[in-house]
Amino acid sequence: LKPRLFKFVRSRQPNRSRAARTPAMAVYITYGEGEADAVVQGGEWLKTIIASQKGPEAGKEFDDKFKELSADLENSQCYGPVFDLFLEHSEDLFGAIPEARGEDRVKEVESFFALALSMLLMSEEAEHMDSATTRLCKLLTSSTQQHPDLRLRLLMNLHNTFPPSLEFRYRVFKYIIDYAAEANLFDQVMPYLEYLDAWMADWETFQHLQPEDKRTLFLDLSRYVRAIGKRLDSFQLLKRYHQLFQVDGADLKDHDEDATAQLLIDAIQIPSVIQFDDILSYDTVKALAKTKRGDLVKLCDVFFTGTVNDLRDFHKKKEALFKEHGLEIQDAMSKIKLLTMATMAQGRSEMSLQEVAKGIEESEDSIEPWVVRAISEGVIDGRIDQLNHKVLVKSAFQRKFEKDEWAFLDTKLSSWIDNLESVIKFIGEQKTLKEASGAAALATAAGVA
């Protein structure tokens, strides 16, 4: 089962129709034996609300129209016109909820929309369902001031109403995240983003999600997540936006240059981001390198292959770049020192603390905390041998993986294979010796007997 945005609280009543199975409907409806009975009682409730808000004449006008449309509802099963009528008069329902002690009315409004959702699914015309879904989404997202939590919950109910095979599911999801961000409720949606890939697989299976839709989705999600202070998550979503341009036929003219610049700024500023080769390989980043913001790409190149001295020289020449984008040279220096240690440790089993200090331009007295930090942040896997003033290295973060690195890996793998073959050969020889020894012992025993 796919994860759902919102879990309904369903009424447990046997042998009931689809409308009767909608969530929380028992709040104000005593179910009859069919959808029509529930719809009639929903109409009665809405008439009462209209009359209380706009007067008895408005209530009677609605009631006359409703009776005309629902006269033969049980036999015709044509719920589209009634749904449209309900939706037309639902604009002010949120205003009918009192500010104080409005819990009961909230339940009634939620139940009314649950009935509307069940009617929407009964629509047999794809065009009507399409337009009705859009109208309902626009109605629910029309205000961020009147009961935004309830509106968001109803949008979630609408999302769950549609099975994955219906194209409207992605559209409703987009309304959900856009509205949640606008209403400052995105923290309520954030936990469900872990299911995004599963939902996208459904949308793509039924061809409801086009490449441009995916790009827009990831770009917007990145912005919304950033707005609630989740910068690392925002960075990861922004990477996925740029990865979508790494396909044949992608038009780089469609990419957002500001988003590309933000990706590079994030990579530079976020302490845990130490890998730059993947970012620099993006076509969008290569395109940015040819613009007036190309110096950001050059700075990332320094983090990719450069040293402490390279960064210092770059900062002297491009100090204005740091000020323009809020980049702190001390933070950048900390990152480049860790990356420099990773480069120094490549292919080695040990390094002297004196050598490390010289490589990152620190004093010998202060080098140990830097090595400890490199180990704790996973830049180096190893330990400090304080007695011999060395760093014992098991492995180190790979800043780049190109021809030389492949050659080194090939040498390592060949060595491991040779070692394994030697072990296997040794085990075979020992087994042969043991078998021969056992046979000789048996022969000796037989001769004595």
Image (cartoon, rainbow, N blue to C red):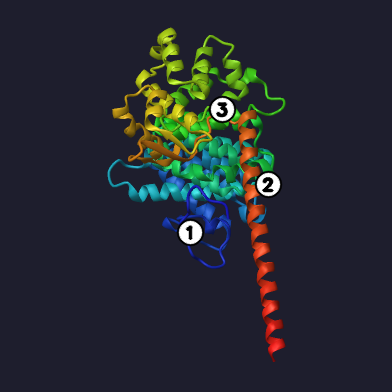
Q: Can see residue 395?
A: yes
- The residues tagged by marks 3 and 1 sit, at their Cα atoms, a distance apart of 51 Å
Residue 58 is left or right of residue 101, and the answer is right
Residue beneath disc 2: 124
- Counting other residues with Cα less than 10 Å from the Cα at mark 1, is it few (<14), some (14-19), or many (20 or more)? few
- The image quarter in which residue 362 lies: top left
**Residue 30 x %, y %:** 46, 61
Q: Is residue 322 above or below residue 139?
A: above
Crowdedness near tag 3: few (<14), some (14–19) or many (≥20) residues, C-alpha within 10 Å = some
Quick one: quadrant of the C terminus?
bottom right
Mark number, residue 277: 3
Of residues 149 and 201, the one drawn nearer to the viewer in this rendering: 201
Which amino acid type corresponds to the residue marked 3 in the rendered image?
Asp
Q: Up-down: is 442 above or below 14?
A: below
Residue at image location 62% in from the left, 50% down from the top: 419
Instruction: Give me the residue at 38% from left, 47% from top.
Output: 106
**Image disc number at residue 10:** 1
